[in-house]
Amino acid sequence: MSFSTPLTLETAHRILQQFSAQRLDFEKPTDTVSVQEALLWVAAHSDYQILGVCADSLEEGIRALEGYARALNYSPNLDLEPMEGSVYIKFNPNSKCYASLYDGKHRGVLVSCQSADATDVNEMYGHLPLDLFEQESHSSNRIAIDT
């Protein structure tokens, strides 16, 4: 795939850092493709990713998790207990997916990149948009990258 702009790990990191939970006062980027590319770029430079979804409902959280998981080549078991209200869903590809009620104000997806090698990406990004990889919202759901 050719990226819309030349992408480096530093550029990808800078794009994703705009979504930091500590920066609630900024205007989020509207270029969905560059955010998707940046996330897939940093994911390609890490061993695996842990996803945390903060959503208004279990259904909304599952939709978001499915989109992100598909984009990152994961197939989580989403057999979660039904619950009403805002939720936090955690997916770790090395363990079970779980959901719990969440009373925090943040909404979005946290992506924690994990790497054994210190020179690779060990960073958390988010809260990224819940619908970043939803098929209804975006024509291209999976972006292949060559590293």
Image (cartoon, rainbow, N blue to C red):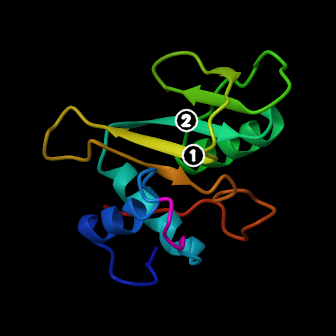
Instruction: Determine whether, in the image, residue 56 is placed left or right of residue 117.
Output: right
Q: Which stretch appears magenta? A: 24-28
Q: CA distance from mark 2 to mark 1?
A: 6 Å
Residue 3 falls in which quadrant of the image? Answer: bottom left
Q: Residue at x 65, y 57 (%)?
A: 133
Locate residue 15, reporting x and y percent: 39, 68
In this view, the residue in front, 146 or 103, is 103
Locate residue 130, reporting x and y percent: 66, 52
Look at the image and tell me in which quarter the C terminus lies: bottom left
| Residue ID for mark 2 | 52
Locate residue 84, reporting x and y percent: 86, 25
Amino acid at dot 2: Gly
Predominant secondary structure, magenta span = loop
| Residue ID for mark 1 | 109
Magenta-colored stretch includes residue 26? yes
Checking the image for residue 59, the label placed there is none
Magenta-colored stretch includes residue 102? no
Q: Is residue 79 above or below residue 36?
A: above
Instruction: Determine whether, in the image, residue 146 is placed left or right of residue 101.
Output: left
Q: Is residue 19 above or below residue 111?
A: below
Check contact, mark 2 vs mark 1: CB within 8 A: yes
Mark 1 neighbour class, 10 Å CA radius: few under 14, some 14 to 19, many 20 or more: many
Residue 113 falls in which quadrant of the image? Answer: top left
